[in-house]
Image (cartoon, rainbow, N blue to C red):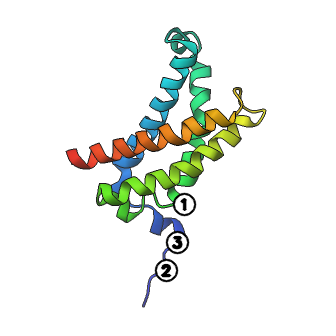
């Protein structure tokens, strides 16, 4: 008798948990670098809520998109060759969704086209490097 698995069960592998933790940290670090570039280091301690709220739209978007697009599927936990493209594919959608969330009245900052382009490129690069390094170490 065949067992039935849900869509998310096919998309989530517990072996990919280290990737998920690292991905969230990389996204938060990416946003932190941007916050520091635009506001200076003192902003981090002077306005920690603003700092965190800058990252929230992208973390929400990543949490929604990455599992659906396979960033944590069984193949993602096997090698950089599979993990990096899955992360980049997920990031391209998540960054756009994060920018849309940031554009709403719920968050400050807006979503200028240049900002979106920078997030797409630097996020893809950061996630790709992180996952490559992870698999070299593991």
Q: Which SS class for mark 2?
A: loop
- Residue at numbered disc 3: 6
In the image: residue 112, left or right of residue 120: right
The residue most toward the left is 137
Q: Is residue 22 above or below residue 10?
A: above
Asked if residue 14 shows in the view, the reply is no
Residue 55: x and y, percent? 57, 32
- Residue at numbered disc 1: 68
Q: Residues within 10 Å of mark 3 (few under 14, many from 20)?
A: few
Q: Residues within 10 Å of mark 2 (few under 14, many from 20)?
A: few
Query: CA gap, disc 1 to disc 3?
Result: 12 Å
- Residue at numbered disc 2: 4
Q: Is residue 40 above or below residue 58?
A: above
Residue 29: x and y, percent? 45, 30
Instruction: Please tell me which of labels 1 and 3 falls first in the chain.
Output: 3
The residue most toward the bottom is 1
In the image: residue 102, left or right of residue 136: right
Q: Which SS class for mark 3?
A: loop
- Which residue sits at x=70%, y=42%? 100
Query: CA gap, disc 1 to disc 2?
Result: 18 Å
Q: Are marks 2 and 3 in contact (CB under 8 Å)?
A: yes
Q: Quadrant of the N terminus?
A: bottom left
- Which residue sits at x=39%, y=61%? 13
């Amino acid at each position: 008798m065949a067992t039935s698995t849900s869509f998310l069960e096919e998309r989530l592998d517990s072996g990919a948990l280290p990737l998920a933790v690292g991905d969230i940290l990389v996204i938060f670090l990416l946003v932190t670098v941007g916050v520091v570039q635009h506001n200076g280091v003192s902003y981090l301690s002077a306005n920690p809520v603003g700092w965190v709220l800058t990252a929230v739209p992208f973390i929400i978007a990543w949490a929604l998109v990455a599992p659906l697009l396979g960033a944590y599927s069984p193949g993602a936990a096997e090698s950089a060759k599979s993990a990096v493209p899955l992360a980049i594919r997920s990031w391209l959608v998540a960054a756009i969704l994060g920018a849309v969330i940031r554009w709403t009245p719920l968050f400050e900052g807006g979503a200028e086209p240049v900002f979106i382009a920078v997030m797409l490129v630097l996020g893809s690069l950061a996630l790709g490097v992180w996952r490559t390094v992870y698999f070299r170490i593991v």
